[in-house]
Image (cartoon, helix red, strand yellow):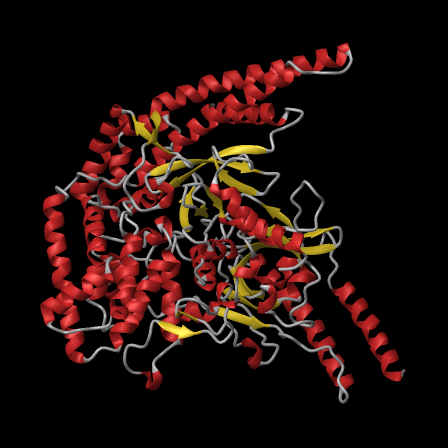
Amino acid sequence: MKLAALTLSLFFWMSSTTALALTCTQTDSGATLLSGQAPNGQPASMGNFELQDQDGMGTCFGNTMSAMLEASLPGHPHLSYQQIAVAYGVSAHRPPGGSGRGSALYTDQFSGRVQTVSEGGFLCAAFEAVKSRNALCTRDEVPLEREGYNQGTLIRGLADFYDAYADLTDDQKRSMRTHLAEVMRATFQRGAEECHFPRVAPVPPVLTRVLQDRCIEKYTLNLEIDGNITRLTAERSSLTGTASEVRDRRQAIDRNIRELRRQKVRVERDLQNLGTVAAVTATTTPDPGKQNGRKAPRFRCTLLPALVSDVESRYYRVLESQGAEQLSSALEEIETRHHLSGVLIAPQQSRGDLRQKYEGDIAYASAPVCRQNQAAMAISNPQSLRAEFFRTTNMCLSEDVFSGLGSAGRTLVGLNEGALPADGILSALARLDQNYDDFLLGAIGPQCLQQINNPPVPNTRPQIPAELSCNSTYFPVHVPTVIGADGEKDLVETARVAKARSEELFRRTIWDSLQNNRPLGIDLCTAFFSGPTADSNYGVNCDATQLHAYHAMTITGRRCVNGEMQYQVQNSWGPTCNYVVNPAGSSGQISYFYECNEDAGYIWVPEDVLLKNTRSLAVLGAAPALPVGGPASRNRRQ
Amino acid sequence: MRILKKIARVGLLAFALSAMASGPVSTLESWRFGEDYIIFVNLKDKGMRVNQGCEDATSSCLVWKMLASVSLQDLDASDLSGGKNIGASLCHKIENAQIVFARNAKGRQATFCAFLDGSMVDSGGLLLAAKMNAAKRGGR
């Protein structure tokens, strides 16, 4: 009885403290503030970063840190998240004794499953791992992150092969390296003949893609306008109601139809200035979306010859012959500007902006993609690879040794988008004896790897300045509130104090970082995706059986709504909010637990909900770090 | 002046589209897959993007069969660790389906699940369908 009374009184006391601590007013230090908008802070905004989708890869900490670094570094470069994830993975999974090259795979304690070392990690530890690099790779230099098809399968295949190779004898390793290098050389030689260098299978580089994006956008808009005109016309002919209602509505519809027709004229004119759109016939590639394209027709825009020739002569020719240095001056050409202006490509951008925007063109060469496909074909069949290895070396190895390589090869075959740089496979094979981060980066971004290992002088590549640091603030994870036979007062008191301290620390850390434009990441349990009552810190632990896991995201703003403080949390799952959908919401309509932006994939989460599920906050810059909570609770990866 | 005109045009179009009494619950979007583009219908009332031509749930497109059967029960802890996109993880569980990356003109990235007949849905849509299927069954 006494115990129940004590529990009850403590419960009410805790509830009242919580309610008081988590309220806000619109005037609370100017409650609404989005990242990068603080007047006196540094110019680091997380509001405009490139929305990412991490696919089925457990690289959330890499995705989040790439966005945080993007906001912090001069010029705000789009950084490769795979590079960050794998740098962390290698530093966190050093081989026993600290020497040797380590493994690409490990068994995750949380799930008990084998996964690559670049999956599952911590924000500030990832920052430290990547800070030790001389320079960083941009996302353009790791095209897999932009154009990937099943990037997880490709990376897992490479990782499997990397670890299988480790189990070979020295003789076998030597033979393997020699043999595979020979296979690649022969493939490339054949490719040189068959691919008709240098420009038979050109990959549309960035500028052409921007023009094509615009062209298809106009085409889609035109289709949508047609659909709306048809719908309105049908509505017009079936109006019901009183005569005056029908008349008013008909007039409104007529106005709308007239406006839509005017828009259609402009859209069609813009489209004509760009090119023509047509459906692509089925290709022979193995991608189901393409091979059986009848269900999802693919479209291409054939740009106007005059536009192409102008871009070719004034842009790519300069790019090809003189490189990036002359790129911006090529775009300065008046005629090119005129063309681009005519098709709404925002020619008012500064030289620097233009150069940064189109520099990615350099990463996209044309003929090498043809070579990439040849190389991928050469390793895609583990049985024939094994047989050929046996014929050449007289060594009989298990097919398992080649299966990872085969899986990677099969993923790559037919990708003509330059998902893997041409020399990636050869480059990775040459690094089989090196650490996994060099091996993987060698495959997915070989040119960048070369440069970060031997940075140019002066080093103009993106790099993390020495003064930039990452500070973690920890929160109590799974403070038990279940009252046991002994020490119940202590347990309840521990939870209460921990939560009260956390509330203050949580708000202060977030506000400080937003107020000073410091990029902010959050490490949390996704339990609250299933509803605002989820409490993985003071209630039930983060529970995998309920599909909850630790995850990293960015916090990009705060606001006060009806006395409740809310934070804008940005995910890296593409433009969707379905992860916070309320299945029990009103029927016929999609209902979310939190307000969300369905285009940008961010949500507004109440402070209390977030606090109950947060494990740590990570701030880039010089932020106060006041650790709370025991280290034992910090071991589970995101 | 040109910019003002452009803003005015966009504003007028937005007005015209929004002014329709029974406004559309779906819009068209183009997404780029490598060199090609696929046009999707954003079915706002259903919370998913399905390729144009398959937007009708009664069509023979495989996507609707998969959406009806996709299940959260197929997932285990390893499909979650590292903050994996659960929708993408669900796609990886479906035989002969694969995840494909796409980008829109705003540079935003998204993953789509492509089925053997070429029909596609965004991974967020797949996740939503799995959640709804679980709710119908009264659990995961």
Pick the quarter of the image with the N terminus of chain A. Answer: bottom right
Q: Nearer the viewer, residue A296 or A42?
A: A296
Seen as rendered, the residue at the extreme right is A1
Left of A309 or right of it: where is A614?
Answer: right
- For image coordinates 33% across by 83% down, the residue present is A98
Q: Nearer the viewer, residue A353 or A268?
A: A268
- For image coordinates 85% across by 75% down, the residue present is A8
Left of A40 or right of it: where is A136?
Answer: left
Coordinates of residue B29 in the picture (x, y in percent): 48, 35
Residue A456 visible: no
Coordinates of residue A308 in the picture (x, y in percent): 25, 29
Q: Number of numbered discs present?
A: 0
Left of A625 or right of it: where is A311?
Answer: left
Coordinates of residue B34 in the picture (x, y in percent): 34, 42
Coordinates of residue A208 in the picture (x, y in percent): 30, 35
Q: Nearer the viewer, residue A210 or A413?
A: A413
- Hey, which quadrant is residue A194 in on the image? top left
Residue A630 visible: yes
- Hey, which quadrant is residue A201 in on the image? top left
- For image coordinates 57% across by 27% down, the residue present is B14
Relative to residue A178, is residue A566 depicted above or below?
above
